[in-house]
Amino acid sequence: MPESGKIDIVLFDVGGVMLTNGWDHNERTAVLDQFNLDREEFESRHPEANDAWERDAIGVEDYLEATVFYEPRSFTKADFIKAMKARSVPLTSNAMPVLKELAATRKYFIGLLNNESRVLHEYRMETYGLKPYFSVQLSSCYLGMRKPHAEIYRRALDILSRPAGSILFIDDRAGNTDAARAAGINAIQFFNEEQLRAELKQLQVI
């Protein structure tokens, strides 16, 4: 158990934990192939625009202007956004049953901590009925900062106003869980539901 006491806050990532990633490499590749776009050209334009987009410094229209619609296309932005959204589906073995189980106990304050653009984050919350389970949504598109930068963990601690040791963070990426631990937050790297349940039992969370 953490030195500061019992865990009473659980923060979940969404992409790679509950659903497929919103707009990661695999999702981008599938959509680019669907529209017969040059991957190398797109990927050269993606990183800078994506960082701003996930921090909500620019909107989806600006992101697409920078990465896809810098020249005329035979499809519309609406077509492309629809295809992007269609890549969001539940993982085969995901943490949604665990999320619902923890919420049902009413013992924990449950939130999310994720990197996502506003348009995809809000679509995913509504489409898969996740919003009611989260008392706080610490998404990059709302905070203006992204994991694994230390500042997003500091901001999360400021907002939650609880000792870092009373918080547990669940994410599929080692870099993100390592950064959480550096901030004093308990962290589990997610691989599948069975593994997550085993580690939660060790922490006496379930």
Image: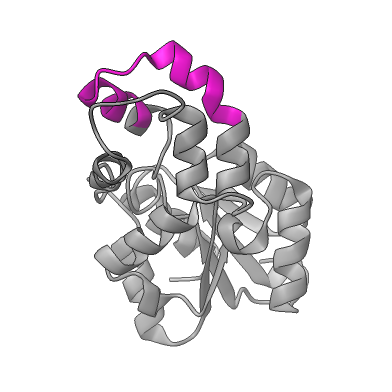
Residue drawn where x is 74% and y is 77% of the image: 162
The image quarter containing residue 27 is top left
Give coordinates of residue 136: x percent, y percent.
54, 75
Give the number of marks: 0
Q: Nearer the viewer, residue 88 or 195?
A: 88
Horizontal side of 39 relative to 187 (left or right) equals: left
Residue drawn where x is 56% and y is 46% of the image: 53
Residue 18 appears in the picture as rendered: yes
Residue 163 appears in the picture as rendered: no
Please report the bounds of the magenta region as a residue range. 28-47
Give coordinates of residue 171: x percent, y percent.
51, 49
View extreme (bottom): residue: 106
What main secondary structure does the magenta stretch of the protein show? helix
Question: Is 186 inside the magenta-drawn segment?
Answer: no
Q: How is the image coloured?
A: one colour
Question: Is 46 inside the magenta-drawn segment?
Answer: yes
The image quarter containing residue 36 is top left
Give coordinates of residue 51: x percent, y percent.
61, 40
Horizontal side of 160 relative to 29 (left or right) equals: right
Above or below, 46 relative to 87: above
